[in-house]
């Protein structure tokens, strides 16, 4: 790209970051947003000037009232949405949430109506297909101690 190109030619994706949190049984924490149907990972859109890891930490604090450490990046997913345009989505490793920390989780009631830990083999039944693929990829990346680049939730070589 050169500086002479118009700004319209530059991608400006909506960017969001989420956190993969597990319990001691390797179940995945999913939240129930109040503003859309279905379940999701805790997280949300970045504010202007905010890094993806800072956004993940802020969103988890705001939505669930906890501040787990934000670990390494598990996946980056290029996932344009027909109705919402270009999207770049990050998932970070939140690790295993100890029982004492789980006891402090409180859904904010504004953006998040509830939450629960779910077995990984239930993800396809609980999540939209593109999100289920992303979460399964994040679990794989965590297991392999790697980071995966995805497009629509599908790992690219």
Image (cartoon, rainbow, N blue to C red):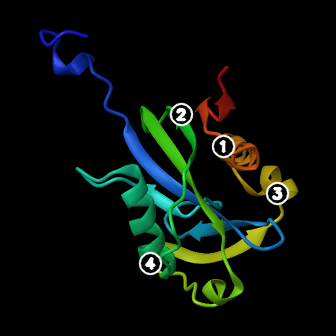
Q: Which of marks 3 and 2 is in front?
A: 3
Q: Residue 120 carries which label?
A: 3
Which residue is most to the front? Answer: 145
Q: Do the residues labelled 2 and 1 touch (CB within 8 Å)?
A: yes
Q: Name the residue under label 4.
A: 110
Q: Going 65% across and 46% down the picture, which residue do you hit? A: 131
The answer to whether residue 151 is visible is: no
Which residue is most to the left? Answer: 4
Q: Compared with residue 136, is residue 10 higher up or lower down, i.e. above or below?
A: above
Q: Name the residue under label 1.
A: 134
Spatial distance from mark 2 to mark 1, Cα to Cα?
A: 10 Å
Closer-to-camera residue (4/26): 26
Q: Nearer the viewer, mark 2 or mark 4?
A: 2
Spatial distance from mark 2 to mark 4, Cα to Cα?
A: 26 Å
Q: Say left or right for 28 vs 49.
A: right
Q: Say left or right for 41 vs 5.
A: right
Q: Going 58% across and 84% down the picture, which residue do you hit? A: 105
Q: Residue 79 carries which label?
A: 2
Q: Residue 124 carries which label?
A: none
């Amino acid at each position: 790209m050169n500086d002479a190109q118009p700004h319209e030619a530059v991608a400006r994706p909506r960017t969001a970051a989420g956190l993969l949190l597990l319990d001691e049984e390797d179940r995945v924490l999913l939240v129930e947003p109040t503003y859309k149907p279905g379940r999701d990972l805790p997280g949300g859109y970045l504010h202007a000037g905010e890094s993806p890891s800072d956004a993940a930490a802020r969103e988890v604090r705001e939505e669930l009232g906890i501040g787990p450490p934000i670990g390494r990046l598990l996946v980056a997913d290029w996932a344009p949405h027909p109705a919402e345009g270009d999207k770049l989505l990050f998932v970070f490793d939140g690790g295993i949430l100890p029982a004492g920390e789980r006891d402090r989780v409180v859904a904010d009631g504004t953006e998040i109506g509830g939450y629960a830990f779910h077995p990984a083999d239930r993800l396809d039944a609980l999540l939209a297909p593109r999100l289920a693929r992303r979460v399964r990829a994040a679990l794989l990346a965590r297991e392999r101690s790697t980071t995966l680049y995805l497009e629509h939730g599908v790992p690219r070589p």
